[in-house]
Image (cartoon, helix red, strand yellow):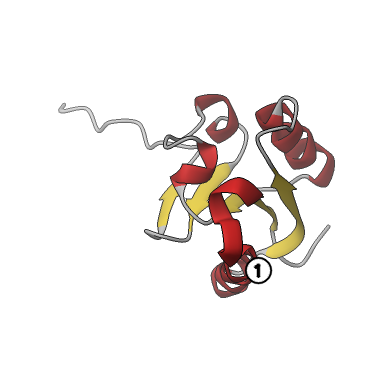
Amino acid sequence: MRPQPAAIGFLRHDVSGAQQQWDQAQIQQLAQRLGYDLCKTLVFGPETDRPLQRVRTAVSRLAAEAVITPSLDHFGGRVPDDLVRVADVITVSPENTYARWLLPPIENR
């Protein structure tokens, strides 16, 4: 068992463009600040076949608790529902966590 929960980074090089290295550094820094062991950063482009399936496979293989991305733009502007079912999705800018687990509503008794 790891001393810290595992995370993977994800970005699209066509979205990051010239700031790809900056985006990767921001993913690393946020992972460290939040207490994650950043195991791997996946860098895909528009030519990548089934990118979300590849991310989910990496989450499963690495037993990752979170996927950290520079922004939702790297996922086409929205949180992928099937990914957030298996891992938290964390964005660097704006910093936000889309958590897997929601607390059930409190019932009035």
Image coordinates of residue 90 in percent, x first then y, are 50, 52
At 72% from the left and 49% from the top, the residue drawn is: 43
**Rendered-image quadrant of the C terminus:** top left
In this view of the protein, can residue 66 be seen by the observer? no
At 60% from the left and 40% from the top, the residue drawn is: 87
Image coordinates of residue 16 in percent, x first then y, are 56, 55
* Residue 77 relative to residue 4: left or right: left
For mark 1, give the secondary structure.
Answer: helix
What amino acid type is highlighted by mark number 1?
Answer: Gln
Residue at the left extreme? 108
The answer to whether 85 is drawn above or below residue 40 in the figure is above
* Residue 104 relative to residue 108: left or right: right
Image coordinates of residue 76 in percent, x first then y, are 48, 35
Q: Name which quarter of the figure residue 41 lies in.
A: bottom right
Of residues 27 and 109, the one drawn nearer to the viewer in this rendering: 27
Location of mark 1 (residue): 21
Of residues 28 and 74, the one drawn nearer to the viewer in this rendering: 74
* Residue 88 relative to residue 72: left or right: right
At 72% from the left and 62% from the top, the residue drawn is: 38
